[in-house]
Image (cartoon, helix red, strand yellow):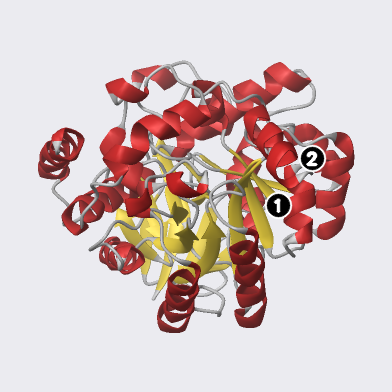
């Protein structure tokens, strides 16, 4: 069936003033000003009054953390003490809690205009060994495109690490489950809805052996690698003290400095390290909100892009950013980077690009996601500008960023509407919110 999304108020694409035609889950053609579709269409969606952008792509998150937003014991702390405060609560995760957390995170993301998300899950308490399977089930139920990373930690408090013993796993268990998940779920084709990546939590929570063997496993199965890196100065100090080198040097020693890798945060890379990232083809996810909340610093996005590093956006976990709203993250990144680099260096289109083509590059999907063009997946976010916050706007696309758009009216993923007139069909948001709040209280108070 050919669907014409007709006459949008604005669209983030050249030569599509009269909209686009969707067919078979892909964008079939762009309709220029004064034109009509080249072939008959079966249905017309009147997009007047709606600004259309590619479906946003979130490249770093921790879904389970929607259970610990604004948790009193973790407020006003920097990264390491923040983690120490939260790990005992996260150790109480069970299947019901995780399913609720994943549903909340994905629903919030989708309602913000996000069509594709990643997740970095690395906490596996006893009884929750199938955590990634739970995430796959929810993604399929909601119809969301997802790159789910099999995270890992094998250094606990008794080994000198931060997490409690109850949430870490041994190396062989981690690698065996990683291989199982790749074999069971990973799709390699364009338009893939579910993909797997491998993601040791951070250099200070896993052994060198696990880092190295994970890189070897990823190369063998041609999947991507993800981890936190250069988020805080504490991390640099830890690596220098325990490993005798900076985090990026350690990563390279473990076989991780290549174009299969995308890194979360990247706040504290120096100029030479940025050049090495660019030469290797590695990518970085900018997490503007969580970096501000935890006072970690500012990712040097402009410098990275000037050097040739691909940069995407991520909302990060809802215990640090306290939100899973990618459109709000776009605005936060725009403001933070403009403050850092100046008015002439950062525009609203840059911020939208980071959340679309930049993020697609991070996850290795530049050929099928992040662009409104023929042959790309029909992943779209449509925003009405009839809220009071937009009253008096001029440029509709600029208004999305500058006026603070926060909720999409329509979202399409692979040619299928997953948000319809501001709602997710089949999902009772009010009941989900109520039950999730009860689950969060149970997890926080459990002995």
Q: Viewed as shown, does residue 134 lie left or right of 50?
A: left
Upstream in sequence: badge 2 or badge 1:
1
| Quarter of the image that includes the C terminus | top left
Q: Nearer the viewer, residue 297 or 340?
A: 297
Q: Nearer the viewer, residue 29 or 429?
A: 429
Crowding at dot 1, Cα within 10 Å, few <14 / some 14-19 / many 20+, comes out as many
Q: Viewed as shown, does residue 222 lie left or right of 259?
A: left
Distance between mark 2 and mark 1 Cα atoms:
9 Å
In the rendered image, residue 151, in percent from the top left (x then y), is placed at 47, 59
Q: Eyeballing the image, is 340 above or below 311?
A: above
Q: Nearer the viewer, residue 363 or 132?
A: 132
Write the residue at 66% across / 75% down.
216
In the rendered image, residue 289, in percent from the top left (x then y), is placed at 51, 28
Q: How many marks?
A: 2
The residue that mark 2 highlights is: 304
Write the residue at 58% across / 44% down.
355
Q: Viewed as shown, does residue 110 lie left or right of 246?
A: left
User: Does residue 183 show up?
Assistant: yes
Crowding at dot 2, Cα within 10 Å, few <14 / some 14-19 / many 20+, comes out as many
Write the residue at 78% across / 33% down.
302
In the rendered image, residue 349, in percent from the top left (x then y), is placed at 66, 36
Q: Residue furthest front?
A: 158
Q: Eyeballing the image, is 293 above or below 9?
A: above
Q: Nearer the viewer, residue 344 or 175?
A: 175
The residue that mark 1 highlights is: 283
Q: Eyeballing the image, is 54 above or below 88?
A: below
| Quarter of the image that includes the N terminus | bottom left
Q: Eyeballing the image, is 158 above or below 131?
A: above
* Mark number displayed over residue 402: none
């Amino acid at each position: 069936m050919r669907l014409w999304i007709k006459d949008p108020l604005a669209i983030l694409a050249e030569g599509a003033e009269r909209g686009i035609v969707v067919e078979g889950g892909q964008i079939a053609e762009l309709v220029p000003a004064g034109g009509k579709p080249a072939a008959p269409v079966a249905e017309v969606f009147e997009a007047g009054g709606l600004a259309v952008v590619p479906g946003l792509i979130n490249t770093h998150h921790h879904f389970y953390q929607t259970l610990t937003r604004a948790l009193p014991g973790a407020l006003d702390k920097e990264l390491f003490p923040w983690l120490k405060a939260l790990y005992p609560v996260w150790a109480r995760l069970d299947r019901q809690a995780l399913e609720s957390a994943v549903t909340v995170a994905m629903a919030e993301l989708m309602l913000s205009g996000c069509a594709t998300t990643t997740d970095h899950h690395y906490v596996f308490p006893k009884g929750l060994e199938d955590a990634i399977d739970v995430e796959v089930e929810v993604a399929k139920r909601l119809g969301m495109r997802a790159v789910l990373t099999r995270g890992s930690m094998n250094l606990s408090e008794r080994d000198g690490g931060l997490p409690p013993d109850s949430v870490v796993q041994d190396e062989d268990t981690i690698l065996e489950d990683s291989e199982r998940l790749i074999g069971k779920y990973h799709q390699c084709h364009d338009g893939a809805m579910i993909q797997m990546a491998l993601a040791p939590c951070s250099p200070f929570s896993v052994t060198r052996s696990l880092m190295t063997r994970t890189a070897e496993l990823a190369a063998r199965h041609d999947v991507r690698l993800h981890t936190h890196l250069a988020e805080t100065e504490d991390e640099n100090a830890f690596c220098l003290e325990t490993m005798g080198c900076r985090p990026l040097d350690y990563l390279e020693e473990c076989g991780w400095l290549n174009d299969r890798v995308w890194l979360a945060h990247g706040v504290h890379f120096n100029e030479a390290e940025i050049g090495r990232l660019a030469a290797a083809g590695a990518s970085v996810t900018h997490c503007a909100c969580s970096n501000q909340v935890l006072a970690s610093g500012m990712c040097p996005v402009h410098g990275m892009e000037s050097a040739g590093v691909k940069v995407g956006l991520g909302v990060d976990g809802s215990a640090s950013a306290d939100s899973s709203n990618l459109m709000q993250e776009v605005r936060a990144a725009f403001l933070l980077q403009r403050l850092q680099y100046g008015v002439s260096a950062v525009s609203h289109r840059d911020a939208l690009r980071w959340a679309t083509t930049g993020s697609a590059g991070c996850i290795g999907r530049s050929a099928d996601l992040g662009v409104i063009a023929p042959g790309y997946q029909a992943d779209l976010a449509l925003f009405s500008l009839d809220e009071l916050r937009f009253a008096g706007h001029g440029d509709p696309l600029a208004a999305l960023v500058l006026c603070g758009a926060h909720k999409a009216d329509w979202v399409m993923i692979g040619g299928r509407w997953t948000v319809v007139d501001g709602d997710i069909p089949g999902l009772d948001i009010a009941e989900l919110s109520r039950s999730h709040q009860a689950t969060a209280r149970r997890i926080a108070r459990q002995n």
